[in-house]
Amino acid sequence: MKLIGTLLLVTCSLLSSAAAYAENDVRVEYAKPEGAVETAISKELKTSNTIGSVTTFIDGYFKLPESLVFFIGGEEGPLYDVAENRILIPYSFVTEIKDRFKQANYKETGVTAEEATKDALMHTLFHEFAHAAIAMYELPVLGKEEDAADALATILLIEFFDNGQEIALSAADLFDLESDDRDTLGDEDFWDEHSLDDQRYFSTLCHVYGSDPEQYAAILEDGALSEERAELCIEEYEYTVQSWFKVLEPYIQDNKTD
Ligand SMILES: [Zn+2]
């Protein structure tokens, strides 16, 4: 009797912890848009599956110790608010990205400014999710957290999304375009918590190349990475994936690990 009772207790507690995770979900909330530009962006985001594809993946793949909210359209961001467990993405961020791709005539690459904006937004959403994961799961961070967040964003896109490499390449190009904002670098660029935009660009290229050197041989042929660096990217991608999944493993939903 006692043993059965204990077993029942164990089963119940297992069920309740599973239920506790199941109750936590990922929600997307939109701020009321102000003005025509924000209204258009808000409508576009709601009708496209860009944010939905990211939140559906997180919801279905990770065990969440608490609900996670993606708040779109506030004043601040992109950032992860640890106190509220919310990821904040302002409408202005989306507008700025799109303007930047348009001004750079990005469509000449074969990807429209609209598509590139969605790609870069997906990378940003996963980058902020990486900060959330580090906080929620109390993960160790050995090195710059911002670099780790960029790497996880690229890895999740490549490993779980069709054309993930292409999505990451648009995000890399955004870093490249942002790096044009500065002619000279000041101390503030070096003390910033993020690596330099140029470094973020090359790191993302490196991970894309490292994930599939045959498919992305053009990165090497174009001279975007030297042969010596590209060679290292192959093992760097592999051990970055291994490192991330080693720490995330306990938080991946049971039916997703095999
Ligand atoms: Zn960050």
Image: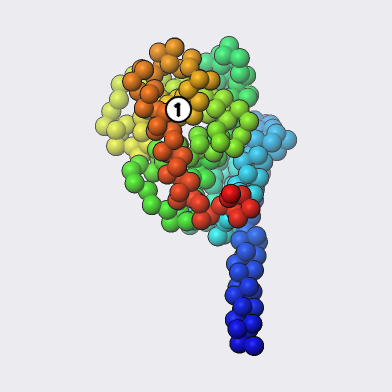
Task: Find disc 1 in the rendering and name its residue.
Answer: 210
From the viewer's perspective, is residue 192 above or below residue 130?
above
Q: Residue at x 67, y 41 (%)?
A: 52
211 or 55, nearer to the observer: 211
In the rendered image, residue 194, in percent from the top left (x then y), is placed at 37, 36
From the viewer's perspective, is residue 68 above or below residue 96?
below
Q: Residue at x 54, y 38 (%)?
A: 156
Q: Residue at x 39, y 43 (%)?
A: 145
In the rendered image, residue 235, in percent from the top left (x then y), is placed at 40, 32
41 or 22, nearer to the observer: 22
Residue at the far left: name it: 187
128 or 91, nearer to the observer: 128
Label 1 Cα crowd, 10 Å radius (few <14 / some 14-19 / many 20+): many
Mark 1: secondary structure: helix
Tally the marks.
Answer: 1
Disc 1 residue type (three-letter):
Gly
- Horizontal relation, residue 101 to residue 51: left or right: left
Q: Residue at x 62, y 19 (%)?
A: 112
From the viewer's perspective, is residue 196 above or below residue 250?
above
- Quarter residue 113 falls in: top right
- Quarter residue 158 falls in: top right
* Quarter the N terminus occupies: bottom right
- Horizontal relation, residue 176 to residue 104: left or right: left
Color style of the picture = rainbow
> Is residue 237 visible in the rendered structure shown here?
yes
In the rendered image, residue 45, in percent from the top left (x then y), is placed at 67, 35
> Is residue 117 visible in the rendered structure shown here?
no
- Horizontal relation, residue 181 to residue 32: left or right: left
In the rendered image, residue 4, in percent from the top left (x then y), is placed at 64, 82
